[in-house]
Amino acid sequence: MSEAQPLLEVTDLVKHYPVRGGVLRRQVGTVHAVDGVSFSLAPGETLGLVGESGCGKSTVARSVLRLVEPSSGEIRLNGEAITRLSKSELRPYRRSMQIVFQDPFASLNPRMTAGDIVGEPLTVHGLASGERKQERVAELFQQVGLRPDQMKNYPHQFSGGQRQRICIARALSLGPSLIVCDEPVSALDVSIQAQVINLLIDLQRQRNFSYLFIAHDLAVVAHISHRVAVMYLGRIVEISDKAELFANPRHPYTQALLASVPVANPRIRRLTPLVEGDVPSPINPPSGCAFHTRCRYAMDRCKLERPPLVEASAGHQVACWLNDGTGRANTNP
Amino acid sequence: MSGASKAEAVLEVRNLKTVFFTNSGLFRAVDDVSFSVRRGETLAIVGESGCGKSVTALSVMRLVPDPPGKIVGGEIILEGKNLLALDDEAMRKIRGNRISMIFQEPMTSLNPVMRIGDQITEALRLHQDISGKDAWKQAVDMLRLVRIPEPERRAQEYPHQLSGGMRQRAMIAMALACRPTLLIADEPTTALDVTIQAQILALMVDLQKKLGTGLILITHDLGVVAQTAQRVIVMYAGRKVEEASVEALFENPLHPYTRGLMASIPAVPSLDAKADARLVEIPGMVPSLTKLPTGCAFAPRCRFAVPRCREEYPPLGDFGGRHLAACWRAGEMAEAS
């Protein structure tokens, strides 16, 4: 990221939602969905965003595309700030950013044929029509592993995995440089999941675009990503190169998350949960480090001061007072 | 109950057949499936959507919606009694009492307008002759047993006031309130976050040990299977294709479908893992149950298929130590490893 210009740069992204109550619908609180998130994404790179429900990962994804308006912060695409552009100014940038959603049943119009769905972005952006559009769509179908003769079928005639392929073809149609994938395989069966992950990997190798890949399944994220960011209650608590993160997790939350994944090996049984309790509400997140209420290593300082995200080793950033650069070793369980 | 016979099998299912009559024809959701669960044992049933794992569970509970579904064959023997021979009244006395079930989404299986304590009390008083006051006390004890903090206060609350993990704990408390011999858990942690999943699985295994309950765990997650089960059956398109002890299954899977499943799950990577290695995939998709191929249902997706696989359905063979597989080539697989 340091060498070339990043494709995507997110700085201090904040998204707050008001909570209203009472007869006058007065604001009674604020949901801190995203609370100061910064990261960058290089061309051709995949950044995985993991975290549990309510950690703000989907809000980050949607803010990047401006499908939700960020409360503050800056988003740069190829060096250009897109945060404050108007709808029409934003349009040319939309071509280079696409999204694939979790539920391929809800994200396809049931009254349109698969071919029309994939071709629609080409029409909207005035890129192709008639014969040329059909050819282009047929090509896209082949690239995602569907047969061109399926173009005339409707979404309900496809299986879940095939529908996700249609969504991917639609995302590819404009030749984007960034594809945001929001839980793209969570709704699919295991054997189909592998097919879709492989397709995403193959497409990236051919076309060199970047993925911002959001999922709650650590193994899936780990598999497809080059770098991984772990989120907790609206903040990134750790971000690193994938191999380094899994070999040497520094944040107690990352450690707990990794230890919670059930290992597919009956000889390694470790059913001892590392964190107790539930994720606190993002309406009144805990003071200081938001994880301190569940952290085994929490100190007084953690309750008072919010730890900044600092470099713990090259390319490995962590927001934890145990890793504050004072040379203290990280506490591995 | 004379539980001593047959190594204390609490449940024996023999040749279960459950079919559904639909507009597009009859399909066999569960086709000739047999298994048993012993006291204190966890049996995992694994497979993808539509493989018949949930219908198997509903059949044991006799909760298959009729019509369109119907149990057309086999025996379900719980503590020596054939459940298929019981009338509805007798079955009601067993459900929630001797067998309980918990589901994936606790919010849809709890009554939203009833206090948690009342829901557990209701289950207790339906099956036991106790006063309301004693039942409430027992309900609070159950909530304490599933490690819900402040159980007295929580018993007074409604389901929406609890988090997802707490709701699933309340479900477990309710299911275990009458101390059933068999608990069926259908994807109990699928809707939960991974740190909460770890808590719930640990709790279930711990309680099972304490109470000696037999457990049928239905899941698609091989990691969950490896962490909890003693025996495993793998289902595909309504049939049992493999059964083994959890160690044997993971060390030496004999059915190509089981092998495919294991290869297609991404593992948490090690340092030397390649950044973006491809996963092993099973080509194609699960066949529709109304249009099953003749012969082995997995043959169209199987790399090892030979002509015979497309003609004859392979019988379940025992490949040593009660490791069963229904595959014409399982013998070669067993030798090769």
Image: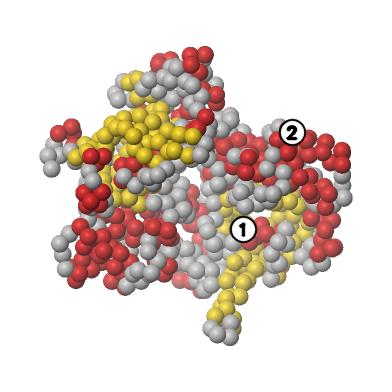
- Check if mark 1 and mark 2 are on a common chain: yes
Q: Amino acid at mark 1?
A: Ser
Question: Horizontal placement of A278 versus A181: left or right?
Answer: left
Count the numbered circles shown.
Answer: 2
Discs 1/2, front: 2
Q: Which chain hosts label 1?
A: A
Task: Give the x, y percent position of residue A42.
Answer: 74, 49
Instruction: Give the residue displayed 52% in from the left and 57% down from the top.
Output: A52
Label 2 Cα crowd, 10 Å radius (few <14 / some 14-19 / many 20+): some
Q: Is A102 situated above or below B15? A: below
Viewer-closest of A62 and A192? A192
Circle 2 sits on which residue?
A148
* Image coordinates for residue A103, horizontal then vertical, percent: 60, 50
- Judge left or right: residue B130 versus residue A272: left
Answer yes or no: is residue B264 visible.
Answer: no
Q: Residue furthest left?
A: B2
Q: Residue at x 51, y 67 (%)?
A: A290
Amino acid of disc 2: Pro
Residue B140 visible in this rendered orientation of the protein: yes
The color scheme shown is: secondary structure
Residue A109 relative to residue B7: left or right: right
| Residue at the spot 13% in from the left edge and 43% down from the top edge | B1
**Label 1, label 2: how far apart the Cα atoms are:** 32 Å
- From the viewer's side, name the closer residue of B112 and A46: B112
Q: Secondary structure at mark 2?
A: helix
Residue A313 pos. (x, y %): 61, 52
Which of the 4 image quarters holds residue A74?
bottom right
Q: Position of residue B185 (x, y in %)?
A: 35, 47
Helix, strand, or loop for circle 1?
Answer: helix
- The circle on residue A58 is 1
**Viewer-closest of A233 and A296:** A233
**Label of residue A256 in the image:** none
